[in-house]
Image (tube, coloured by chain):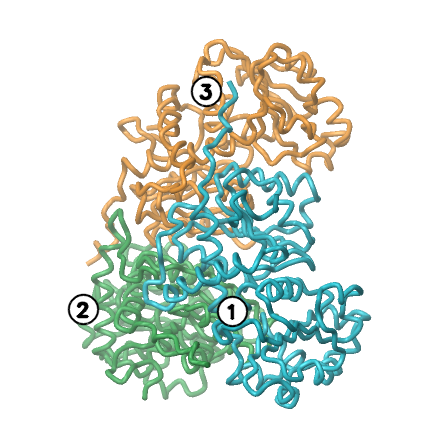
Chain colours: A cyan, B orange, C green
Amino acid sequence: MDAQLDQHGRLRHLLTTEGLDGRLIAEILDTAETFLPVTDQAVKKVPLLRGRTVVNLFFEASTRTRTTFELAAKRLSADVLNLQVSTSSTSKGETLLDTLETLQAMQVDMFVVRHQASGAAHFFARHAAPGVAVLNAGDGRHAHPTQALLDVFTIRRHRPDFSALRVAIVGDILHSRVARSEIHALHALGVPEIRVVGPRTLLPAAVDTLGVHVFHDLERGLDGVDVIIMLRLQRERMEGALLPGAEEYFLNYGLTERALRYARGDALIMHPGPINRGVEIDSGVAYHPRSVILQQITHGIAVRMAVMAMILGSHSRAPEGAHALP
Amino acid sequence: MDAQLDQHGRLRHLLTTEGLDGRLIAEILDTAETFLPVTDQAVKKVPLLRGRTVVNLFFEASTRTRTTFELAAKRLSADVLNLQVSTSSTSKGETLLDTLETLQAMQVDMFVVRHQASGAAHFFARHAAPGVAVLNAGDGRHAHPTQALLDVFTIRRHRPDFSALRVAIVGDILHSRVARSEIHALHALGVPEIRVVGPRTLLPAAVDTLGVHVFHDLERGLDGVDVIIMLRLQRERMEGALLPGAEEYFLNYGLTERALRYARGDALIMHPGPINRGVEIDSGVAYHPRSVILQQITHGIAVRMAVMAMILGSHSRAPEGAHALP
Amino acid sequence: MDAQLDQHGRLRHLLTTEGLDGRLIAEILDTAETFLPVTDQAVKKVPLLRGRTVVNLFFEASTRTRTTFELAAKRLSADVLNLQVSTSSTSKGETLLDTLETLQAMQVDMFVVRHQASGAAHFFARHAAPGVAVLNAGDGRHAHPTQALLDVFTIRRHRPDFSALRVAIVGDILHSRVARSEIHALHALGVPEIRVVGPRTLLPAAVDTLGVHVFHDLERGLDGVDVIIMLRLQRERMEGALLPGAEEYFLNYGLTERALRYARGDALIMHPGPINRGVEIDSGVAYHPRSVILQQITHGIAVRMAVMAMILGSHSRAPEGAHALP
């Protein structure tokens, strides 16, 4: 059985976009559409998850991502716990399990997990009690499914027909869980041409197995595309041996007005944020008229509300069997 | 008058289990029983403390304990403030009073106080305004009453008759506020035989005044008991002169399958958590079929809800006299 | 147009007391009066801002100030996000704008901003989307308007007639945003005599342009005043070259029983807190029968509720235009 679906094919956890079929993704996006007006009105609150407890369990700090999950949960009227856990204080394996078991014993309904180790969210999902859900908010280099879903949601609002779309993902593909999750989601929705653009040192060895077209030249990579997704360059990479420096990177792969001209005249500009101005994107381009970067943030809350509501709305916590002991 | 009871003998603060009579403890446990189903259902929320403000005032960090109080308060619909105060930035005495006075001026209804100094919660209670309640969430080596109450709650659910019970508390009795509070609660409920088991260096000098049987040998200490309460060994102790090392401690006092055989065949295994696997308890024993360690966590929220509701439900904040100045 | 008023002269942001006219200040104080009973009753909650999102965006740590804004927002039923941002991790200008834009994209309704740079709140207000409000919770040496408003609120409750009042502000005027905001508010309400008292090194060069009387001698400065406002002395000043030391400062400018005798017999004693006992105020004087320091805290919540309700009550978020892109 699929790790994130129940026996009826409904979402039970959200761990990855890999293996999610287009119909289920479309259902998530349709549900997110219904939440978009909620966040627009003065009373941004629906009682769907009243009395439910959502834990943001972040082993890796990210104020921005944590905040969007927190707002999504609060606008669904859930109670939210924010737990920032330093992994230095925990050893692996068993104590990760202890953390899970302990919070489950507190009757938590949903874990939003971010961890620097690939597979951490799967680990949680595998050991979660019936009725307890796990949302992957980023695990190592592996997956960041809500980011990918908000990206395709944003694309769909502007380009509803995926069947003739050309999308370029630009930057550090090698370390990017965002890129990986986006590629799976775009494939599932039938996007015929997905390109990855970046220096050889920042592309995975087996990049062609992802079903994408590989470009090392930005201008060629952007040529004629409908959507440009810029990735964030982690500062650590620039200090390592993989890259010559921020300036040279910007010269070759930074999105500028000039580079933009190679794409279609109405191409969307996207970025998961936070942006490094002058590194992967020019300051002027970030808030370009065709930039939908801020919309991505707004949509991110609607998409997260949709996922939470779909999972916790259809499944309720199993009756506690813990007191069965005589 | 008692520091934690009002003139009608009802709970006004919860500072210690010392001096609480069995009838009042039973009333708390009975109330906690009524909250247990609340945390089991999907909508884990009752409006009892709506509009009340509960402050978690932690001078000593403890994410786990803070979280259980936070969840208890939120599930009673209270507003919760989490304040982590470093004692390095405050001097003692007067400024502790300033902290109390300042938060009281913000119309806080309840303080949940954790402090490394024995007596801190009593200090707060002594200076609290009428109608403002103090819950002791652990003060120095002195008391941790909600932990003791959740422990006896857990025992009662499995062994309702206290009158023929043998309970062994194993480990670092000397530094343990948990042990002290448990001993008082077990006595009050009529447990006829309470044993403490540990090395001489980790037993208080006047241990016999506590009305317990003292054992230095684990197997003899466990012989025929109905309940085993393991204490957490603080890592600091192992680095000090009191103990030879974690491995030797585990050999002598760690709870293993082998040691377990000396207790009754249906003996409950308890631990306040978080557990140190391989130090005071064997990994396999922690989630043993007879372990009720995770239940203790679940019960802890119900017990804390009960205490909060009993105190704030029956007492309302006194009308503010602060504006009496002409 | 005024930076903090709309075209109808109503509050749109609260950035400074400078330029606020007496009628608007009185309206804020009258509104705060209506909230004072709310915080006194058991259910300290009104649904005015239900479903609104308030962000405490603190670039400068202040648990105390943050807490009062958080309680004010929660008692109005708003959802509250606490974001502590270290300015070391952000560069200035553009990324401050990115922070604003990002949080606005999350459909935040109100920013409570505290920043060490004078003008930060104005910057936010200037770039805020229609319907998004900014409250200044202290910016550099510039302004701290809610502190000034709660001070005049407290004075008015005890001395309703401002037209014959003498007020002395004592201490580090030079670095104090509190003093600046108080002076503007007291002027606007028609206080005829405002004095500032402090050593030459802690008075601004152009102090006389503020329309105040300057005193370097505490006893003369307090002579016959109705209200004494002590300022907090920042520890940093004492380590710098501006001051000889805490003890000598206390000898010359500390408020003691002895110094108090120079003021009127019914003079109010005020302090924005937290107090430095033995530096700017004597321990015994802090909770003197005529001290209204704790009342200031209580009033601070009512005043902040009033400002939030006035701004968000009359203005609703503009319909999102972000999806206008084809």
Same chain for mark 1 and mark 2? The answer is yes
Q: Give the amino acid at mark 3.
A: Arg
1 or 2: mark nearer the eye: 1
Could you tell me how far apart the alpha carbons at marks 2 and 3 are, in whole angstroms? 61 Å
**Residue at left 37%, top 87%?**
C208
Q: Mark 1 falls within which chain?
A: C
> Viewed as shown, does residue A123 lie left or right of C178?
right
What SS does tag 3 mark?
A: helix
Query: What residue would you read off at disc 1?
Result: C59
State which chain disc 3 sits on. Answer: B
Q: Nearer the viewer, mark 3 or mark 1?
A: 3
Image coordinates of residue C223 in percent, x first then y, are 29, 72
User: Which residue is the site of mark 2?
Assistant: C160
- Residue type highlighted by circle 1: Phe
Q: Is residue C234 above or below residue A133?
A: below
Residue in front for this viewpoint, C292 or A57: A57
Q: Secondary structure at mark 1?
A: loop
Quadrant in the picture for the C terminus of chain B: bottom left
Check contact, mark 2 vs mark 3: CB within 8 A. no
Mark 3 surroundings within 10 Å by alpha-carbon count, few (fewer than 14), some (14 through 19), many (20 or more): some
Earlier sequence position, callout 1 versus callout 2:
1
Residue at mark 1 to residue at mark 2: CA–CA distance: 36 Å
User: For residue B156, which numbered disc appears in the image?
Assistant: 3
**Mark 2, residues whose alpha carbon is within 10 Å: few (<14), some, or many (≥20)?**
few
Which-is-in-front pick, marks 2 and 3?
Answer: 3
Q: Is residue A112 above or below residue A67?
A: above
**Image spot of residue C65 (x, y percent):** 42, 62
